[in-house]
Image (cartoon, helix red, strand yellow):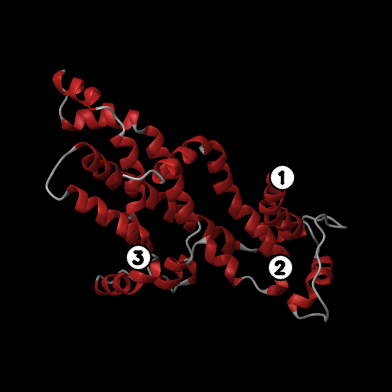
Amino acid sequence: MILIVLAAAICFPVVFMLGGALMPDWELTEYLGAVLGNAEGMASWSLLPRAPTLEPVVELLMDSPQYFVMFWNSMKLSLCILAEQLLFGMPSAWALAQYSFPGQKAVLLLYIILMLMPFQVLMLPEYLVLNRLNLLDTHLAVILPSVFSTFPVFIMYRFFYEIPNAVVEAAQIDGAGEWQTFLRIGIPLGAPGIVSAALLGFLESWNMIEQPMTFLKTESLWPLSLFLSEIGLDEAGMGFAAAVFMLIPALLLFLCGQDYLEQGIAAAAVKE
């Protein structure tokens, strides 16, 4: 019973959002008039709309070209960040897991410290560097700092570390070079960690708000996450519809890679 109550509490915002996306303006005004400033009293809500309509969805998809611009901006940013995180992160994680060198634990500790640092701590140094490189107000200003995120490296490191040394040594005895061992042994056996890191990386970049808000000034470069914050209270229906459509890619990825994601979270929780 406790789990059912907790599950219902967690799912309520999604149900709330779906209901709002199907409500006409007059019904939203009736429920949220006190919040929108159009009425006095207290706000109320109904899980099911009394007069379901697709008007907010049509308004979003047909009358808001800005939505599509920002949607593709989000896809561009997320996919570029994800591809480069894997390109640089996989060899880094493999090296930390499979090679012994002086200062190895110090490097790993530095990765963990950087992973725990919030964006607010790094915001000013990143802003100054990007300004010196004349990259502010470009997509590269958001992509480049995110490419070298340490969290995907830490996730993949845990899975590469679990690969038995005997398997790696057997490949080397058979004549496999360093890159062949990495490509033919490391990546296939560490695939769950790579997939889980990719899922977490995509979810993080898809929902990022502070980085584009800080580094991007031109509205046509904004991702979809900033589109929601620009919707006025008098456009609540379209706001609910936009939130639903923003949720769909992340939800589909989560459902497809749920098992890998759970393994990645469990690996990140294991102490070295």
* Residue shown at the point (42%, 66%) measured from the top left: 211
Question: Where, by quadrant of the figure, is residue 135 drawn?
Answer: bottom left
Mark 1 burial class by Cα count in 10 Å: few <14, some 14-19, many 20+: few
Q: Is residue 150 left or right of residue 40?
A: left
| Mark 3 or mark 2, earlier in chain | 3
* Residue shown at the point (47%, 61%) measured from the top left: 208
Question: Where, by quadrant of the figure, is residue 141 drawn?
Answer: bottom left
**Label at residue 141:** 3
Q: Nearer the viewer, residue 194 or 70?
A: 194
At label 1, which amino acid type do we have? Ile
Q: Position of residue 9 (x, y in %)?
A: 69, 54
Q: CA distance from mark 3 to mark 2?
A: 31 Å
Tell us which disc is closer to us: 1 or 3: 1
At label 3, which amino acid type do we have? Ala
Under circle 3, the secondary element is helix
Q: Position of residue 147 (x, y in %)?
A: 33, 54
